[in-house]
Amino acid sequence: MSQLLGDIAAILIGLSGIAVIIGVVLIKRGNRVWHPRVMLTATALAGLFLVFYLLKWGLYGTTRYVGPEEWRGAYYALLISHTFLAALNGPLVIWLIYNALKGRFNIHRAWARWTVPIWLYVAATGWIIDQVLARYGESAGGIRF
Ligand code: HEM
């Protein structure tokens, strides 16, 4: 069940990354109708990801890395950068949407240049971390209902 919740979360964050790429392509082609729709879908997918992720966390606690020692450093570098940027991504996305809805597109564009790569990094590394833990993870315990 723990891995299933993790897999659903990983699929959702992966889909949100794909939606962000489609949203960028749309606005580069000048599509101001579908760009917001697709970006808001990407945001909803990322929000759903958070629900599944927190559910997994609450039910099963964290997962410890028990894979090859020579990869431990690389794994933690990925995990720490992923967690830090994921926390940063939330406020950035709210700020982006806020400015877009206010019609402040210069500010929106300037911040979007930073937010999009961060979002894609978080989505890609989230997916990778889930795959690594599916193979080399061990439950570290948590609240059980
Ligand atoms: C989190 C969601 C969003 C992200 C990540 C995002 C990202 C982007 C990106 C990357 C660009 C192109 C920047 C460039 O040309 O280099 C852009 C432009 C634009 N976005 Fe968004 N966007 C989001 C949500 C929205 C929403 C909700 C709206 C509308 C209400 C919107 C309206 C626009 C418009 C009109 C432009 C063109 C601005 C211009 O060139 O003057 N975006 N956005």
Image (cartoon, helix red, strand yellow):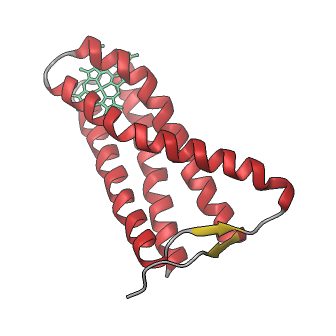
Quadrant assignment for ligand 1: top left
The answer to whether 24 is drawn above or below residue 62 in the figure is: above
**Which residue ends up furthest to the left in the rendered image?**
102
Numbered label tally:
0
The answer to whether 30 is drawn above or below residue 46 in the figure is: above
Q: Please state if 3 lies on the left or on the right of 145 as rendered.
A: right
Question: Of residues 15 and 73, which is closer to you in this image?
Answer: 73
**Which residue ends up furthest to the right in the rendered image?**
70
Instruction: Give x and y (percent) for residue 120.
Output: 50, 38
The residue that appears at 43% across and 21% down in the rendered structure is 113
Splitting the image into 4 quarters, where does residue 116 fall?
top left
Instruction: Give x and y (percent) for residue 14.
Output: 49, 51
Q: Please state if 99 lies on the left or on the right of 8 as rendered.
A: left
Q: Please state if 109 lies on the left or on the right of 138 as rendered.
A: left
The residue that appears at 86% across and 55% down in the rendered structure is 70
**Which residue ends up furthest to the top in the rendered image?**
106
Instruction: Give x and y (percent) for residue 80.
Output: 59, 46
Instruction: Give x and y (percent) for residue 84.
Output: 50, 42
The residue that appears at 55% across and 45% down in the rendered structure is 82
Quadrant of the image containing the C terminus:
bottom left
The residue that appears at 38% across and 23% down in the rendered structure is 112
